[in-house]
Amino acid sequence: IPGQYVDLSRIFDHLDASQTGFRDIARQRIHEEIQPYLDEDKVPVVTGFMGHVDKGILEGIGRGYSDLTAGLVAAALKADALQVWKESDGI
């Protein structure tokens, strides 16, 4: 199965995490970046970093930035499930 690196580092550009609709806008941007590769039957390999966050990551988003990334990607792709593995040996 072919994979495709997808750089999501511009998803949060010019977005304020406290703004109404932040998650909806981010999901739409992610969908637009990833869907073309899925249409080509490629497995997207995405970055965990989605760009500069107004007020900084900790103040603008808080802890769990990578979990938010995973959740937004899963929502954008209408995934049936999401698994987040943390502090697992060998991962």
Image: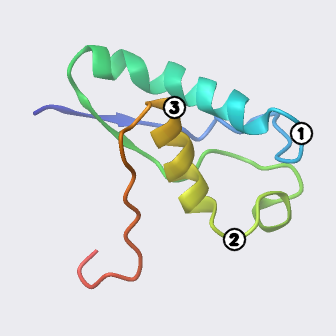
Compared across the picture, whether 11 is left or right of 38 comes to right
Compared across the picture, whether 41 is left or right of 56 comes to left
- Three-letter residue code for mark 2: Arg
Q: Which mark sits nearer the N-terminus, 3 or 2?
A: 2
User: Pointer 2: what residue?
Assistant: 63
State yes or no: discs 2 and 1 in contact (Cβ < 8 Å).
no
Callout 3: SS: helix
At x 41% / y 64%, what residue is drawn? 84
Q: Percent from the top left, x then y, of residue 73?
A: 49, 40
Q: CA distance from mark 2 to mark 1?
A: 18 Å
User: Pointer 1: what residue?
Assistant: 19
Q: Which mark sits nearer the N-terminus, 2 or 1?
A: 1
Q: Which mark sits nearer the N-terminus, 1 or 3?
A: 1
Q: Nearer the viewer, residue 84 or 43?
A: 84
Q: Quadrant of residue 15?
A: top right
- Three-letter residue code for mark 1: Gln
User: Pointer 3: what residue?
Assistant: 76
| Labels 3, 2: front one | 3
Q: Residues within 10 Å of mark 1 (few under 14, many from 20)?
A: few
State yes or no: discs 3 and 2 in contact (Cβ < 8 Å).
no
Q: CA distance from mark 3 to mark 2?
A: 21 Å
Q: Percent from the top left, x then y, of residue 78?
A: 44, 31
At x 56% / y 50%, what residue is drawn? 69
Callout 1: SS: loop
Q: Quadrant of the C terminus?
A: bottom left
Q: Percent from the top left, x then y, of residue 88?
A: 32, 81
- Three-letter residue code for mark 3: Ala
